[in-house]
Each structure stands twice: as structure tokens, then as C-alpha cells.
Amino acid sequence: MPQMLIWVQLFMVAMPTLWLVLGALENIRAPAANGTMVADVLAMRGMRDEFPHLYADLGRNRIESPRLHRWIFAAIVISETLIALVMLTGTIALLLAALGAVDLELARILASIGMLGFTLIWSAFLVGGQWVHYWAGAEGAQHTHFLLTIWGSTVLGLLVL
């Protein structure tokens, strides 16, 4: 059974790793796709358009600076890329541990650090999103970030059993 647990952990870490690697690559390859969305959320454009009565009360939290939008997006892409690399390292280490080539505890530690980073990205989006009230105007993004936080937390919990 312990050998089976290693393979389960490997699979459970590999999937969010592949998801984040693809996401980071897309953000590097086509930054306008998510960069524009980040700018819209920070400027609270969705809330302004969909909920003008709320925007009148909450719009003071908006961030309008295109320079700050670019800086924040760059910080997101750099963080995602670094965390994706740590996750990839943890995934490879788990594979090598399953094959008996690397210490299992070291592999689990590396994978756990990566999964903690994954979970922290989406938790940070939820906190930052609360500042700009993205539940009104970008609720699809908020739901996605909640699900990603839960996914990361679940896999992290599986690793530290």
C-alpha cells in the first residue's frame, strides 16, 4: 500500500503542476489574454458596467494605473513561473522516489513546497480580489480561484499524511 500512495501522490501533484505550467506558458506567450482581465478586475470595470450602484459605493478601491496593472501582472507571471518550476521539481522528485532513485521524504517536501505555492497563488488572488470586490463583475474568476485553492489544499493535505 505505501508504494501505491506514492503513485497516487505523484498523480495528484502532476495534474496541478501541468495546469500551472500551461498557464504560466500561456501568460508568457500571450500576455494580453490574462493581462487585460487583470487590468479590468483591478480597475473594477466589470462592477462599473454590471453593478453601477455598487460601484458608486465601492469604486474607490479601484486601481486605474496601467503601469501598476502591468507591474502586478508581471509579478503574477513571475510568481506562477517560479512556483510551476518548483512544482515540476517536486513532481519529478516524486517520480524518482516511486522508482526508488530519490529519498521519498525529500520528494514529498519538494512537492509540498510547490503545492503550498500553488495554493498561495490562488489564496492571494482571493484576498486581492476582495479588495476590488471581484465577486461583482468577475465572479467567474473568483469561483475559479476558490476551486484552485481547494484543489491545492486537498493535494497538499494528501502529501503531508
Image (cartoon, rainbow, N blue to C red):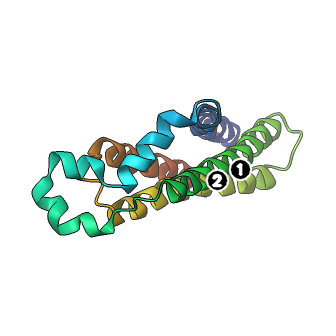
Name the residue at 46% across, 46% down: 151
Nearer to me, 76 or 82: 76
User: What type is the residue that disc 2 sits on?
Assistant: Ser
Examine the image and state in which quarter residue 131 appears.
bottom left
Residue reaching furthest to the left: 53
Relative horizontal placement of residue 111, taking residue 66 as reference (left or right): right
**Residue shown at 59% from the left, 37% from the top:** 27
Q: Residue at x 62, y 38 (%)?
A: 24
Asked whether residue 161 is in view, the answer is: no
Q: Where residue 60 sits in the image (x, y, percent)?
A: 28, 69
Residue tagged by mark 1? 82
- Name the element at disc 2: helix
**In the depicted structure, whether residue 61 falls above or below residue 46:** below
User: Position of 90 compared to 50: left or right?
Assistant: right
Q: Quadrant of the C terminus?
A: bottom right
Find out whether the residues at labels 2 and 1 contact each other: C-beta distance under 8 Å.
Answer: yes
Tag 2 residue = 79
Q: Nearer the viewer, residue 152 or 140?
A: 140
